[in-house]
Amino acid sequence: MANETSYDVAVLGSGPGGYVAAIRAGQLGLKALVIEKDRHFGGTCLHVGCIPSKVFLNTAELLDRVRRGGEQGVVVDGLRLDWPALMKRKNRIIRKNAGGVAFLFRKNNVETLHGLGRVAGPGKLEVQTEEGTSLVTARNIIIATGSEPRSIPSVPIDGQSVVTNTEMLALASQPASLGVIGAGAVGVEFASMFHSFGTNVVLLEVLPKLVPVEDEEISDELFKLFKKRGIETLTNTRVEGVTPANDGSGVDVQFVRPDGTKDSRSVTKLLVAVGRKPRTENIGLEQAGVELDRGTVVVDEFMQTGTKGIYAIGDVVATQQLAHVASAEGVLAVEHIAGRAVRPLNYLHMPGATYCSPEIGSVGLTESAAREQGYDVKIGRFPFAASPKATILGESDGFVKMVSESKYGELLGVHIIGPHATDLIAEAVVALEHEATAESLMHSVHAHPTLSEAVGEAAHGAFELPLHV
Ligand code: NAD
């Protein structure tokens, strides 16, 4: 890259926010540059987040299916997890996807620069590369630097025994036991997959419920199903500290139970999964006059900061920290830069997808949020136990819950826990985006036998006309 080149758009960070923004910029004929500090493109999601964790979860699910195979006449003796093979596959999938991002940059004429970038003023970036400092000028800058794990003072992360998602996805061997602090998406996904791998898991959550952002019934169901699977799941539990284990093979984690009694567990690894903080320090934002609010970048509905020509997307802004939200924000920011007619995102319509077993997919208002907003709420439910397809799959735990408004049937939210919930939720997202009613979902014909019938049946349930329960 020539030092003097000026760009229409320079994107700082190549995660699902940044790389999608850059591709769309290229597609729209804008001269675009991506600046990435790591050797490979893709960010947290591709290297230490969504993608590798889903590779692990897929293997966990395969193990569980094979374990249950006997009931379908498939008997496998000597089943075991080949850890090095799992790691090799994970690394191969990451490499393939990172190569895919690089290919898409080339295809869309997006230029790239590897180095640590910082804003050096409106329209200016300074990048520390292996060769020295490069200066970049760009009419527009998009901050897409993502986030990093938060920690808690009483449990310092050492990267050895007390770890984050990054180390968990690169372990040399399978740990005998695992403690997980925090039952958000990261916590429940790791607890779920490592339990299926055969690791002894204890999950410690300070709040009264698992996956606290989800509808209460979904959280309750997950709690029940985790217990049924044999995962030690402790809610209302406050972690007090951590000490090296006496035998030197991990740590002892001390915690306080809801009744005030103190307890502890010895674990080989302790995963801290208590949230992520935006990466907004030392990248020149304050000097460029960009307003921050408790570490997050303040933006308007088109992702613009108060400083002309500087946008921010993804985990650095105070919207849901989800890869697909970052991508949608990236597209919005670039189309706004290109002068296209764009409309702000409706964050209530962003799907949530948690890949524990069983999966959770959700969109829109929870029942309690709908009631708090004053809606006269009507609920439709359908259990997967009554779904022939779920029975065939041997995965009949969970249900679909539909929240609608009683007078006009306005669809307010759909919450699914069960097989393929993260795929099933797509129908509800489209329905909400198109302001569909529960009635229109009821009259949409779902193929038989499919899991999607459960969504249609929940709509029938909202009118007290369920067919198969
Ligand atoms: P989170 O904020 O979703 O959950 C953190 C959990 O830790 C909460 O339940 C919180 O109550 C609990 N907690 C906080 N302090 C604690 C303490 N001292 N002791 C015990 N529990 C404590 O954070 P996360 O799970 O780390 O995920 C980070 C972000 O990444 C989230 O926004 C999440 O949605 C996103 N993410 C999404 C997915 C997905 O969509 N599948 C997967 C991974 C991460």
Image (cartoon, rainbow, N blue to C red):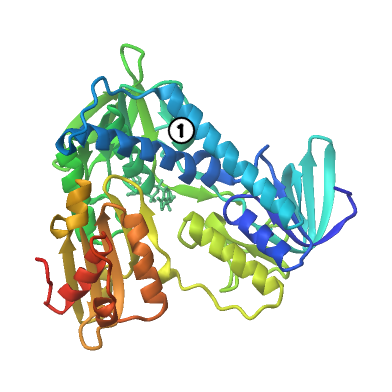
Quadrant in the rendering for residue 235 = top left
Along the line of sight, which residue is nearer the eye, 335 or 59?
Answer: 59
Q: Which residue shows up at 31% across the image and 11% down it?
A: 247
Q: Is residue 266 above or below residue 142?
A: above
Quadrant in the rendering for residue 121 = bottom right
> Is 303 on the left or on the right of 467, as rendered?
right
Q: Is residue 240 above or below residue 452?
A: above
Estimate how packed mark 1 is, as few (under 14), some (14 to 19) or many (20 or more) residues with alpha carbons within 10 Å: some
The quadrant in which the C terminus is found is: bottom left
> Is 18 on the left or on the right of 395, as rendered?
right
From the top left corner, tell me how far across and down residue 459 is, in percent.
22, 74
Q: Which residue shows up at 48% across the image and 31% down it?
A: 89
Amino acid under label 1? Leu
From the top left corner, tell me how far across and down residue 269 is, in percent.
36, 26
Say whether residue 296 is visible: no
Q: Which residue shows up at 56% across the image and 65% down it?
A: 329
Quadrant in the rendering for residue 84 = top left
Along the line of sight, which residue is nearer the eye, 49 or 63?
Answer: 63
From the top left corner, tell me how far across and down residue 198 is, in percent.
27, 27
Q: Residue furthest top?
A: 247
Q: Is disc 1 placed on a helix, strand or loop?
A: loop
Q: Which residue is mark 1?
A: 169
Say whether residue 455 is visible: yes
From the top left corner, tell me how far across and down residue 364 is, in percent.
34, 70
Along the line of sight, which residue is nearer the eye, 159 or 418?
Answer: 418
